[in-house]
Image: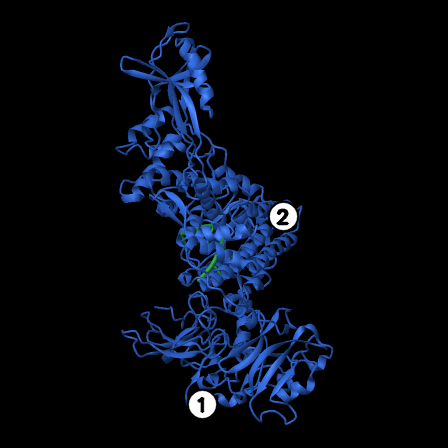
Amino acid sequence: MEKNIFIAFEVLLLTTASGRVVKPIGEKEGFSIYNKLYEFDAMVFGQMCRMVMTSVSGHLLNYEFVGTYKNWQSCSPESLFSAPVIKSCSPDFERIKKTLESQCRSCNVLIIWTDCDREGENIGFEIIDTCLKIKPNLDVYRAKFSEITSPSVKRAIQNLERPNKLISEAVDVRQVLDLRIGAAFTRFQTLRLQKVFPVLAENLLSYGSCQFPTLGFVVERYLERENFIAEPFWKIKVTHEMNDLVVEFRWARDRLYDEAICRSILSRCQENPIAKVEKVEGKPKSKWRPTPLDTTEMEKIASRKLKINAKEALRIAEKLYTQGLISYPRTETNIFPDSINLSSLVELQTKDPSWGGFARNVLREGPRPRQGKKSDQSHPPIHPILYSNSLSGNEARIYEFIVRHFLACVSKDAKGHETTVKIDINGEKFTASGLMILERNYLDVYPYENWSAKCIHEYKQGTTFTPTLLDISESETTAPNLLTEADLISLMEKHGIGTDATHAEHIEKIKIRSYVGLENNTYFIPSAIGMGLVEGYDTMGFAMSKPHLRAELEADLKRICEGTKQSNIVLQEQVNKYKVLFQKAKEQVNKIDAAMSKYMGENAIHLADNEDPLNVIMTRTASVMPCNTCGNDMVVRKHQETLYISCSAYPACKNSIWLPSKVMQLSISEESCETCGPNVKKLEFKFSPGSMAPYYPQHYIGCLNGCDQDFIEMLGVKLGQTNSGSNPSLATQVSYNYTQASTSSGYHSLSSLQSTDTDDTWDRGGGSNRGQKRLRDDNAGRNDGDVPCCFCNIPAKKLVTRKEGPNNGREFLVCSKNDDEKCNYYMWADELTDVKCYCNISAKKLVVRKPGPNQGKEFYACSKSQADKCNFFQWKNENAESHFSNTSNKQDHTRTPQQFRGRGQNSARGNQRKCRLCHQPGHTRRNCPQNGE
DNA sequence: GCAAGGTC
């Protein structure tokens, strides 16, 4: 084998280069139980290669705000337009990422097989970025396929391309914009309206670039209907009754909106009310079978005909897909590729008592699919894969519909014969038509459509007859119907709002948010909240609820893909555009209040400026000065009783200035520092009595940017990293880095952590430790119990199990950070040991359970989860010196755990002996814990 | 507590 090729799929598929699904040489578990690994050999680049294949499940990484920007109360919504965002892996996807990281080590080439659309390209780059971090010299290719069939896969592997960064960048732009705009406007309108209308206190009033236009469609149709003025119109009605059959003729002028003219035409007809048959025409007429089924069509028909809403229909289809009964349900394709074996799929259905006979007929004639015009280049139309007769309820109904639709679209159009009769009554023309159905064909298997025959008399050209009725009829125009779910999906598709996979979600979202409701369980009607929001922004002159904002972005994204516009420029322009809209919306927020008030029938509470929740946040999160590390705002914060000034990008940036306990109050003054410039605000301090030198007043207004050296020294803030001020020696930033906080033993006392707020507990550093916050060494080893560090390398928190059961009362340790920041460290206190693993955390003690010579013997191993743990292993009664059975390798004995770890990585190249049984270093097969012999 | 996009 020359090369190892690592392929990553967006959805799982096992093929060889020839495209045949094969029995893999090896199937092994990755870290994620849902994303397996397969190994097989295939010919690539003219040589036989060992392929390792796995899948990811959609996006691996997600943009999110960091630190204080996640918190609604800690930053202004407006700051979200420029707040730092990071792309990170959510916990659910960590295992998939780990599989990629571990597998790519042994590969030379990476081939991306994600869907060949924009999102797929972006997912591809998430995989690439993940793997290149581990193995920078991987050669990366992109397989481009038009569908997942044997010839297409074969063609793709023989014509590998390079991944397209531009396409991926366009998706990044969309992601960042959706996040910034969605979060900023959601927080803005939620915070404001909850305060102004207490009745909304529990409502989340979200804004999103897809959900809002979706709401807009509903409101627009509702208003069209409300504002509709009916207009009367008149028609001339002609019927001809004979042998109990009434034939109705249509007027060639259809309708007239002027009664007088219509009546005068009628009078003329009545002067000589004889109908002359001018033409009788007969021609074949077909009713076309449906095109192969794509997602939106499935949702629309399910909603219209089965009365199962789009969200539920898609959920059921996904379930049928995971059961292997139908093909992938999220597809925009309505064309069957030539290579798909339709006969065998039809064959599977021949055993069914209801549609089996029809399927046999199709087989006899040979399946002939009617082809549509859409292709997503990835997935075939939705079709049954296996036969099932054991489903029930809506699952059975959706499955039956998919089967019937499939059989219908590969059968034949219905055929009929249409007769059209044209008559003349004293100069006015009328027509009537009849329909005879000759062959029902697909209609026999497709009850979701019908075709009615229409009878007509036998007329002969040149003959005459006297109409039974010749009169005028009056009607009026009717308002358009409210939108059904199927109408809404059609509008979303037409205007490019959402994707096939998300239409149903956006509709569901506006229902959950109480922006819309359903009338007669069928027609969408906007709620007071929905009306108020849309009209509020409309009165400002913004088309927030119209689809064209999204359409403009789509056009720009296309330019990025084509290389005619740079992604950073598009992002900047779009962010600026929405930021201006946001600022205007904030200025005119009263208009939203007024519109909401109008529809909700509630008075808006008038808020003074200092009561406006947005202003309150602004005051609290006002910038003291720019951070000298990252440029974001430094803001005043408080931890328990201790005031400090920290970078708003925490934890991405940990720059902070902790103030001593003698600072009792701190506020930002209106005044900027004359020396440091307009962006640096002076601070108003109030000190505890007698805590400062006599010449400092108890109230003092000063700058902490570095220009006021006397004050900084008096305050007791140690000088740290140089600020960007004029005098580098006057810097004030003190960086507290928890990872530096370990004592020599690596253990901290719980009591020392709890007392961090008192100034004396901390050694603010000096000399080589300048700028680093350290715990005093004498805190280690106190009687109240040493505690180990968690994965964040800060002392863990000890808790007691309260849940009833065998562990009730047992102590355990977890990360001491807040819920949204804490790591997943978990350890029983009674399993704590002094031994540290390669991760430099306390190892746990375990017992060999496997029967054999080692059964009952105790050993130490990494305490992290299976997915995260290192290779550390040590028998309990052997000291660190005996880790390695290779005694000639003396220098290893003095290595630190970190060095061992480095060594462990080298060992992949064969420098270090590993156990032949479990392939872990540090012991031999003879004393391996897995050795049951 | 926020978006939209993948997907299991």
Q: Please tell me whether mark 1 sits on a helix, a strand or a loop.
A: loop
Circle 1/circle 2 CB separation < 8 Å? no
Query: In the picture provided, is A143 more to the left or to the right than A369?
Result: right
- Looking at the picture, tell me which residue is in the foreground, A466 or A665: A466
Query: What chain does badge 1 belong to?
Result: A
Q: Position of residue A304 (x, y in %)?
A: 36, 38
A777 in relation to A843, above or below: below
Q: A494 and A723: which one is in front?
A: A494
Q: Tell me which corner region of the image, top left, top right, bottom left or bottom right, holds residue A809.
A: bottom left
Q: Residues within 10 Å of mark 1 (few under 14, many from 20)?
A: few
Q: Whole-percent x and y of residue A198?
A: 42, 63
Question: What letter labels the chain drawn in green?
Answer: B
For residue A3, say whether it is visible. Answer: no
Total tally of numbered discs in the picture: 2
Quarter the C terminus of chain A occupies: bottom left
- Which residue sits furthest top? A462
What is the drawing colour of chain A? Answer: blue
In the image, residue A890 sits, relative to residue A379, either above or below, namely below
The residue lying at 47 percent from left, 26 percent from top is A257
**A121 is higher (above) or lower (below) than A398:** below
Q: Seen from this angle, which residue lies furthest front?
A: A260
- Chain letter for mark 2, please: A
- What element does badge 2 sit on? helix
Label 2 crowd bin: few (<14), some (14–19), many (20+), radius 10 Å? many
Give the residue type at disc 1. Answer: Arg
Q: Position of residue A928 (x, y in %)?
A: 40, 71
Q: Which residue is mark 1?
A: A782
Name the residue tied to disc 2. A560
